Image: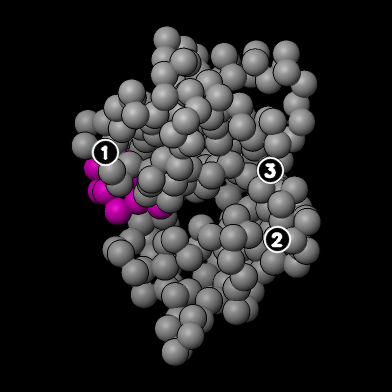
Amino acid sequence: MSSPLVVVEGLRKVYPRGVEALRGVSFTAFPGELIAVRGRSGSGKTTLLNLLGGLDVPTEGRVFVDGKEVTALPEAGLLELRRDVIGFVFQSFGLIPVLSAAENVGVPMRLSRTAPAERDERVKALLALVGLEQHANQRPYELSGGQQQRVAIARSLANRPKLLIADEPTGQLDSQTARQIMQLLRALVRSEGVTAVVATHDPSLITLADRVLELRDGVFLEAEPSAV
């Protein structure tokens, strides 16, 4: 078996006034694995994902991604990790309104100074991968919610990340579109070889995951096997 891409050890997060969002959680995630983190609002899902991506600092515990200790990296190291190793997909899409779909997908590659010709080819390939090659020149307001989320997913893959972190990526979508987005994420995990950790509270989407981790009051309940 390959080595885990993600290792989380004894992660604890206490906010001001003693609010304990995570209470010593640990888990590993392997390359090519789609993990669903399930739990009600306030269970600690977003806190966990923020700590995985280096967007927050734990009170205790350690996070390793691709062999690097995220919880010990300086800000410059975190920026590099988020640019080159981790891709993010958020519930609110986070697209730049004045840019076209293609331009939004190309933003991470501009930040990493990818050569224009290589960037253009990658943008075309990613839009085709998410089924939006015919919408490259449209701006976000000209796209449906599901199409906007597909653009956001394509953008998250721009720099070929090893880890994809998605926080309630279907929260603003109807149930049919939400399932299509989760099916797309599952297909991309296979085709792109990335590891994905997806937070969701939608039980209809859980069966698409390889593994389910349920958070309740900041701790994991026993992991459930996928139904597929």
Residue underneath mark 2: 70
**Where residue 102 appears, x then y in whole percent?**
53, 21
Mark 3: which secondary structure? helix
The magenta stretch spans residue 200: yes
Q: Quadrant of the C terminus?
A: top left
**In this view, which residue lies farthest toward the bottom?**
17
**10 Å crowding of disc 3: few (<14), some (14-19), many (20+):** many
Quarter occupied by residue 180 = top left
**Where residue 76 appears, x then y in whole percent?**
78, 56
Residue 94 in sight: yes
On residue 83, which mark appears? 3
Q: Amino acid at mark 1?
A: Leu
Q: Residue at x 69, y 31 (%)?
A: 110
The magenta stretch spans residue 159: no
**10 Å crowding of disc 1: few (<14), some (14-19), many (20+):** some
Mark 2: which secondary structure? helix
Please report whichever mark, 2 or 3, sits nearer to the chain's N-terminal start.
2
Q: Is residue 190 above or below residue 117?
A: below
Q: Amino acid at mark 2?
A: Val
State which region is magenta.
Answer: 199-207
Q: Is residue 215 above or below residue 128?
A: below
Distance (Cα) linking label 1 and label 2: 32 Å
Q: Camera-side residue: 129 or 74?
A: 74
On residue 173, which mark appears? 1
